[in-house]
Image (cartoon, grey):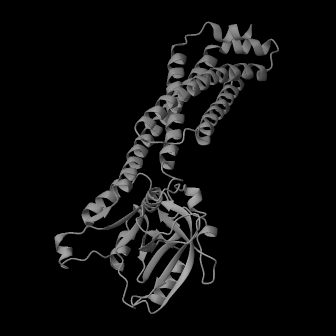
Amino acid sequence: MLNKLLFKNQDKKQLIIAVIGAFMGITFLIVSIHYLIKVNQFGEGEDILGPNTIIVQKKVSNTSTLGLTKTDFSKKEIEKMKNLSFIQDIKPVIANSFDVYFKTNDSLVPPFSSDVFIQTVDQDFLDISDENWNWKDGDDFVPMIMPREFLVMLNTFMSAQGIPQVSDDLAKEINFSFRIANKDRSLKETVDVRIVGFTSEVSSILVPESFMKYGNEKYSDGMEQKITQIMISSGEGEFGLVEELMAKKGLDSKNSQMIVGKLKSIVGTLVIVILGISIIAVFVSGLVLIQYMQLLISRNIYEVRTLIRLGHAPKVIIRLFFIYFVKIFGIVTGLALTAFFLIKYFLDAMFTSGGININTDVTLESMLALLAAYALFSFTSFQTAKKGIFSQF
């Protein structure tokens, strides 16, 4: 009876406009938050390198081949790049200045050996725990991160020998060894090695910094080591600035790293724009709904005052307005959630067909954003109704 009295015969054009705006705003809000997170997570867990990280080196030209230009980085160059606003961190990639001979040392796999090139990078750039990435003289084995292309080569060799190929997990159980020595092989020793991770972005075997320091100090020829590669970590959505820096400085990197970086930067920027528009749409539509409530209360001043004089408690009338608008926003939220899952289904399929395999799980943050929007509107609705009704006394 009270609902009919207060809400039945009202012009709902403004309400319909606000509902449509809220529906579109909330839908794009949760879609943009969901895919902003998914894009930033793209590639994580598949490689041991941390996010937004690339390895660069100077391009080799005819002049550098003739020795007229340098291909190594000076400390001054590194420090100058590090001070740029879009660079989060930059560190040199240290290489071995001693001989390293790598071989299998396990009955599970056939004998395989090769001279190899090893490197080390700052642990801050690696997605690996301290527990798996430390070494000191006397330890049972040296942990290493193997290039995935090296494992492919090993599997190709094993296949040619008629031996079953090995998976990533099985490869981590195989025993390997390094024979390290100085240039004339007058000093040498053998250490056991185990794989703790893989990378598709580095072409050399990675070892802990402590092991590299040990080898360089004990077996190097004493020459000053040149830094020919550096690792750069950039901020979110700032890969374009890194690309400009690389073009300006004549730097080069793996195509796969550049593609992933560009993809995350472009899509991330686009999603942030959509997110900003969505927040504005939700705010404006919520504001229109609140204004409609205020208008509804002002149009029903006579009815509200009459109900209060007849003995209806102000809290009851406040609750009527509050429940009415919370139900409306609840329906909008439900429709937006349904639309989100429909859009997600088509976008996930589109990403997959395009070769971008992102995790399809629903992000917690997008659902929390939905709940936050609902809770904020509910609170605002209650306060507006309370202020409007008590102003009639």
Quadrant of the snapshot with the C terminus: top right
Tell me: 230 left or right of 165: left
Give residue 168's quadrant in the image.
bottom right
Q: Quadrant of residue 269?
A: top left
Residue ranking furthest to the right: 311
Q: Nearer the viewer, residue 84 or 4?
A: 84
Q: How far across and down, in percent of the image, does residue 202 sit?
A: 42, 64
Please report the residue visible at 64 percent of the width from the left and 24 percent of the height from the top: 330
Residue 238 visible somewhere in the drawing = yes
Give the residue at x 64% y 77%.
Answer: 140
The N terminus lies in quadrant: top right
Residue 339: x and y, percent?
A: 53, 25
Q: Residue at x 69, y 23 (%)?
A: 322
Q: In this view, does 103 lie to the left or right of 134?
A: left
Comparing 392 with 46, the one in front is: 46
Q: Where is residue 268 in the image (x, y as percent from the top left)?
A: 43, 45
Q: In this view, does 125 lie above or below 137?
A: above
Could you tell me if residue 25 is visible in this image?
Answer: no
Number of marks in the image?
0
